[in-house]
Image (spheres, coloured by chain):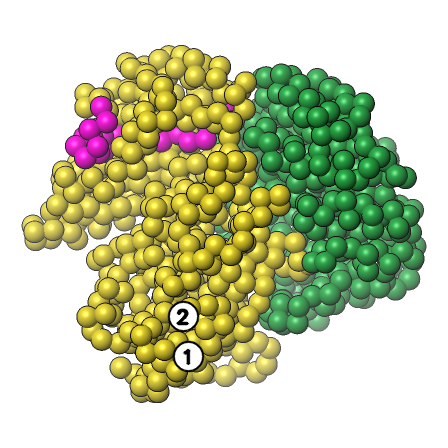
């Protein structure tokens, strides 16, 4: 693929012109942000242009009083968080950091395009729940915006949500408008252990349904033992966490520990569990009540798991050869998407099955937005 | 009645039964408007399907006859989104009002579209609740909430309908059935569908997420001499990193109107009332009562009351929620707007509205969700005075424009419908609208689902891909191609 032309537009107009030229010339474009998730999806079809968002790296606005911001696609999330933290705010998105040196290269554009998220999804949802507007470039050079810069707005179709999780196959996200939240100075983390999946599930259920206003509620499981982690934020985190610790102990967890303003490494480990360079990572969505069966499936496939206990979202690490057995073992109705996969070569379908009627609608949408098949061809569901 | 209608009505009668296909002018009259009564249109028929399969068959029949259809829930919408089309059918979902399942361990409730918003919270009380709470929640339907992406007083903290929809079973405009699920691989068609105002299909089975009810709720009511001071209090609260469950403001005129209907004891000498509600764990909530009281007083509040019990809280809220309905007590007619502004521009935009109202010699009452900058200016007028309705509408339009100019939106929760579609170009450029149309065309290439809403001008889809062919309407100059 060394013959591909590399472009790094610095303005929206340049980006639009680059796509238009490619679309009109029958060239296929691969869109690259921080390249931290470039192996996800089907293997890329051949492409002639590699379009980097590195030149679109400005925080266009941070309206602290309104708790909103506008960020170009190439802004690294870490840089944005640093800016927001200065105003005591945060973008409530905490997907895994990339790279073992701790440098967070993931960009807003890439996080939005893949719909990636971390433990804070428990309370705040994923990128699609935090984006209030977007500006996009389509393959014919159209530059269009949707939504707005205010938190509340129902004018027009929600194209920004459509872009979230679309893997760049509908067009290039140029900038996103996001809502921000206050960053609490005080947090507390409670962690408890279990070696019986049913105990872990009972504790997760107790915390998920408690009126505790948790920031995050995570589980992990490996080699026959697991943990439940809960985080609260606010000036009175400590007494609140004390109650959570008692609830965990009552539910049968052992070695319950309360960490005031700490526990960062525990949460980093949860995030790290969503990635692997040596094993396959499969993102599974199941009902939260299926946690014990999820763990049983993971054990049978010699895997490990981290996940959002109340949402039923898990990241399972298994050897690549165990992906198919894992799919077969999952609870009914669960969906499984392969994310990281070590090694080269053709991939099995990473997306899993999709309803025919839905695939049909998905193709129609692709044809409307990118009729020339210019943007990120081949990587998405159905080979889109 | 367009050619072919008698045949379609015969078909609908076969599908749903004679009782549930309304064609008599008296029966149709009920459906000619939604909550926005000044738009009226009688449809050719109203059909009331009993279940998802019947909805799919009805839509299929419309599709085959190329007759447009408008889905309708409780008809409480405030943008004319459920206004019938002259040549079309209304699909009333009022018979589909069953709660299909309540699954608290997974915090999910599955409902039919005719179930009311409040019925969901009631079904999961007292341990859980469903956060989006439009003022019409006693009657408005979840199907309508999905179409409009409804908000309410509590969305500053909790988000909107779109944040609480997990899955939808949707009848597409050709009658086919598809499940849109938040967790399914593929495009976020669920996110695109919610808030699409009935133009992409009909949601027939709706999976909602409910969340644990807050342990503690504390409600305060503060009175200020003017909206500027109340706005300063809001700024102080938000800047302190406090995220109240709700922050609602009423100005002098809306206090006067609402107090007449509820008699809750709002101060009539106040220029503004601020309702602040905090909810969450008791440890966080209780200390906030004194902190918020101090903040309001520092901003100039001359009285701050904290509700002592649920009855007092109810009374405070009843007055706020009665604001729209009470307007009739001080004005023969009024026009509601739904503009949004960045919260920090509040004082400036309110001054602009005052200036405009003076220019137009009309009174404007203001009720708003202060946390998220969603204004509901109520332009009062007398419809018996010739020309006053037109002046009120013009003033309302200028208020919307002021919101957009301040960096906001033409609508925060009521939707575009027919009422605000003319304002869409003030917010969106041609390229933006054309991009919206791409989404619309993927779902509904024939433009049969709720046509004439949202988009400012009629648009056609064209074939994709393939050679260009001129549509008859385009040839006749009725519509443009994008």
Q: Residue at x 28, y 20 (%)?
A: B223
Packing grade of label 2 (10 A; few <14, some 14-19, many >=20) is many
Question: Chain letter for yellow?
Answer: B
Q: Secondary structure at mark 1?
A: helix
Q: Is residue A286 visible?
A: yes
Q: Which residue is mark 1?
A: B15
Q: Are marks 1 and 2 in contact (CB under 8 Å)?
A: yes
Residue A209 belongs to the span the image colors magenta:
no
Q: Secondary structure at mark 2?
A: loop
Residue A138 pos. (x, y %): 60, 61
Part of the protein shown in magenta = B241-265
Q: Residue at x 35, y 13 (%)?
A: B297
Question: Eyeballing the image, is B352 above or below B235?
Answer: below
Residue B354 pos. (x, y %): 23, 34
Residue B16 pos. (x, y %): 39, 76
Quadrant of the rendered image containing residue B464 = bottom right
Packing grade of label 1 (10 A; few <14, some 14-19, many >=20) is some
Q: Residue at x 67, y 26 (%)?
A: A247
Q: Which mark is residue A74?
A: none
Q: Is residue B450 visible?
A: no
The residue nearer to you, when weighing A383 against A281, is A281
- Position of residue B355 in the picture relative to residue B88 (left or right): left
Say which colour chain A has. Answer: green
Q: Which residue is mark 2?
A: B49
Chain of the residue where label 2 is placed in the rendered structure: B
Question: Eyeballing the image, is B20 above or below B64?
Answer: above
The residue nearer to you, when weighing B90 against A211, is A211
């Amino acid at each position: 693929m060394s013959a591909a032309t590399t472009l790094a537009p610095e303005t929206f107009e340049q980006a639009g012109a680059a796509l238009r030229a490619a679309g009109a010339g029958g060239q296929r474009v691969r869109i690259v942000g921080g390249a931290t998730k470039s192996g996800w999806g089907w293997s890329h079809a051949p492409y002639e242009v590699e379009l980097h968002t590195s030149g679109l790296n400005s925080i266009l606005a941070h309206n602290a009083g309104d708790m909103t911001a506008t960020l170009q696609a190439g802004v690294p999330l870490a840089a944005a968080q640093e800016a927001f933290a200065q105003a005591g705010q945060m973008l409530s998105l905490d997907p895994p950091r990339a790279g073992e040196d701790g440098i967070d290269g993931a960009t807003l554009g890439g996080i939005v395009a893949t719909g990636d998220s971390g433990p804070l999804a428990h309370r705040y949802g994923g990128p699609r729940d935090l984006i209030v507007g977007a500006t996009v470039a389509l393959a014919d050079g159209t530059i269009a915006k949707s939504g707005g810069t205010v938190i509340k707005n129902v004018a027009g179709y929600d194209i920004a949500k459509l872009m979230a999780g679309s893997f760049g196959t509908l067009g290039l996200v140029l900038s996103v408008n996001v809502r921000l939240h206050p960053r609490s100075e005080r947090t507390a983390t409670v962690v408890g252990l279990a070696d019986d999946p049913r105990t872990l599930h009972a504790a997760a259920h107790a915390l998920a349904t408690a009126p505790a206003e948790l920031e995050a509620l995570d589980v992990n499981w490996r080699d026959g033992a697991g943990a439940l982690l809960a985080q609260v934020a606010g000036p009175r985190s400590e007494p609140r966490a004390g109650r959570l610790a008692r609830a965990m102990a009552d539910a049968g967890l052992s070695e319950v520990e309360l960490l005031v303003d700490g526990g960062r490494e525990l949460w980093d480990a949860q995030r790290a569990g969503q990635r692997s360079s040596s094993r396959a990572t499969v993102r599974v969505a199941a009902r939260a009540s299926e946690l014990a069966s999820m763990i049983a499936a993971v054990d049978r496939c010699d895997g490990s798991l981290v996940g959002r206990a109340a949402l039923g979202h898990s990241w399972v690490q298994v050897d690549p050869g165990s992906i198919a057995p894992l799919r077969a073992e999952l609870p009914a109705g669960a969906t499984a998407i392969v994310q990281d996969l070590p090694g080269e070569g053709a991939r099995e379908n990473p997306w899993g099955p999709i309803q025919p009627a839905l695939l049909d609608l998905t193709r129609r949408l692709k044809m409307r937005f990118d009729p020339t098949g210019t943007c990120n061809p081949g990587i998405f569901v159905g080979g889109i | 009645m367009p050619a072919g209608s008698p045949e379609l009505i015969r078909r609908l009668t076969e599908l749903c039964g004679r009782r549930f296909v309304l064609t008599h002018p008296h029966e149709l009259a009920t459906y000619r408007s939604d909550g926005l009564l000044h738009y009226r249109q009688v449809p050719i028929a109203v059909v009331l399907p009993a279940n998802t399969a019947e909805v799919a068959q009805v839509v299929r029949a419309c599709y085959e006859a190329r007759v447009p259809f408008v889905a309708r829930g409780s008809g409480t919408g405030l943008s004319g989104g459920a206004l019938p089309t002259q040549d079309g059918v209304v699909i009333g979902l009022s018979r589909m009002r069953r709660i299909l399942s309540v699954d608290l361990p997974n915090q999910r409730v599955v409902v039919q579209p005719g179930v009311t918003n409040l019925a969901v919270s009631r079904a999961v009380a007292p341990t859980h609740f469903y956060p989006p709470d439009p003022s019409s929640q006693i009657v408005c339907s979840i199907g309508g909430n999905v179409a409009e992406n409804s908000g309410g007083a509590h969305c500053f903290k909790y988000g909107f309908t779109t944040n609480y929809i997990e899955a939808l079973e949707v009848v597409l405009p050709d009658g086919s059935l598809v499940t849109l699920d938040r967790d399914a691989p593929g495009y976020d068609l669920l996110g695109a569908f919610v808030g699409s105002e009935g133009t992409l299909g009909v949601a027939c089975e709706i999976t909602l997420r409910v969340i644990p009810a807050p342990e503690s709720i504390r409600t305060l009511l503060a009175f200020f001499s003017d909206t500027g001071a109340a706005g300063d209090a809001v700024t102080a609260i938000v800047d302190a990193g406090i995220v109240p469950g709700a922050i609602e403001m009423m100005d002098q005129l809306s206090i006067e109107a609402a107090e007449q209907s509820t008699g809750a004891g709002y101060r009539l000498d106040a220029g503004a009332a601020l309702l602040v509600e905090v909810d969450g764990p008791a440890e966080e909530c209780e200390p906030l009562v004194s902190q918020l009281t101090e903040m309001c007083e520092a901003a100039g509040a001359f009285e701050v009351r904290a509700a002592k019990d649920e009855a007092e809280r109810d009374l405070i809220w009843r007055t706020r929620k009665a604001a729209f309905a009470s307007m009739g007590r001080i004005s023969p007619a009024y026009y509601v707007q739904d503009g949004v502004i960045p919260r920090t521009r509040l004082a400036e935009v309110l001054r602009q509205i005052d200036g405009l109202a003076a220019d137009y010699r009309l009174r404007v009452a203001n009720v708003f969700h202060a946390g998220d900058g969603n204004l509901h200016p109520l332009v009062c007028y007398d419809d018996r005075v010739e020309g006053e309705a037109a002046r009120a509408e013009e003033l309302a339009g200028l208020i919307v424009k002021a919101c957009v100019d301040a960096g906001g939106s033409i609508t925060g929760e009521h939707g575009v419908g027919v009422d605000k579609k003319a304002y869409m170009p003030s917010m969106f450029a041609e390229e933006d609208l054309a991009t919206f149309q791409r989404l619309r065309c993927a779902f509904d290439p024939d433009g049969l689902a709720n046509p004439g809403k949202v988009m400012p001008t009629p648009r056609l889809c064209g074939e994709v891909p393939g050679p260009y062919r001129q549509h008859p309407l385009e040839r006749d100059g009725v519509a443009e191609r994008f």
